[in-house]
Amino acid sequence: GALFALYEGYQKIVHPHPLNSPMVAVVILVVAIGLESYSFRTAVVESRPLKGGASWWRFIRNSRNPELPVVLLEDTGALIGLVLALFGVGLTVLTGNPLWDGVGTAAIGVLLGVIAVILMVEMKSLLIGEGATPAEDAAIRAALAGTDNVDRLIHIRTQYLGPEEILVAAKIACPPAADLTTVAATIDAAEARVRAAVPAARVIYIEPDLDRSPAPG
């Protein structure tokens, strides 16, 4: 779509020609802007509870629910594109210069390209597996490290399995003298602390080990 719009814009700029029924185009664009604004408002209302205090850009970048960011970007792009189209047609009508129609079309092509790149980057990360957000990762690490009988968090890996489900795999260092009962209780306590800190952490695998890090000094 972006390439086609850029091609059309190029043709209209290089070979400008008068618009056919420009007032009909203006009326259609105005009606389309009104309908698209209603759709955009609905997407904003549905997304606001999930967005919290974050900015809209951060919500789109960090959201693990792909549907709402896609709808927001689509509606935003459609609204801006309609405004650009109205801008091009309107200036063509006012000035009598069809060059403005080509400029508006080319601008729409650039807009579509930018949105496509953003969607590719965001959807790729969700398709191949995206880890917990920095805040969630910090909360999970603090919950594990703060569990009784955990000497140290050796390493951790996280991955979103769905919009509201995180896989947590961690290795913890337990005291060398801890017996099997103590280790099992420690793992259970660590899992409970992680789920309390990050409710989305539903699948948790914790491996106990000994702390083999070199002694200081």
Image (tube, rainbow, N blue to C red):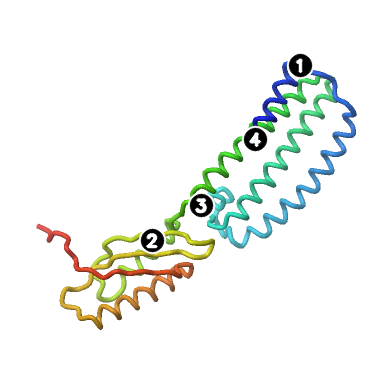
- Indicate which disc, 1 or 2, sits on the residue closer to the N terminus: 1
Which of the labelled discs sits on residue 15, or is there none? 1
* Image location (x, y in percent) of residue 146: 31, 71
> Who's the residue at 87% across and 29% down the image?
22
Inter-mark Cα distance, 2 to 3: 23 Å
Q: Residue at x 43, y 61 (%)?
A: 136
Front of the two marks 1 and 2: 1
Dot 2 amino acid type: Ala
Q: Earlier in the sequence, mark 2 or mark 4?
A: 4
User: Which label's residue is closer to the chain start, 2 or 3?
Assistant: 3
Along the viewing direction, whichever of 130 and 153 lies nearer the viewer? 130
Image position, residue 40 (x, y; %): 71, 51
- Residue type at mark 4 is Leu
Q: Earlier in the sequence, mark 4 or mark 3?
A: 4
Q: Residue furthest front?
A: 128
Determine whether the residue tagged by mark 1 lies in a helix, strand or loop.
loop
Relative to 209, is 4 above or below? above
The amino acid on which the numbered mark 3 sits, given as a three-letter code, is Leu
Neighbor class of circle 4 (other Cα within 10 Å; few <14, some 14-19, many 20+) is some
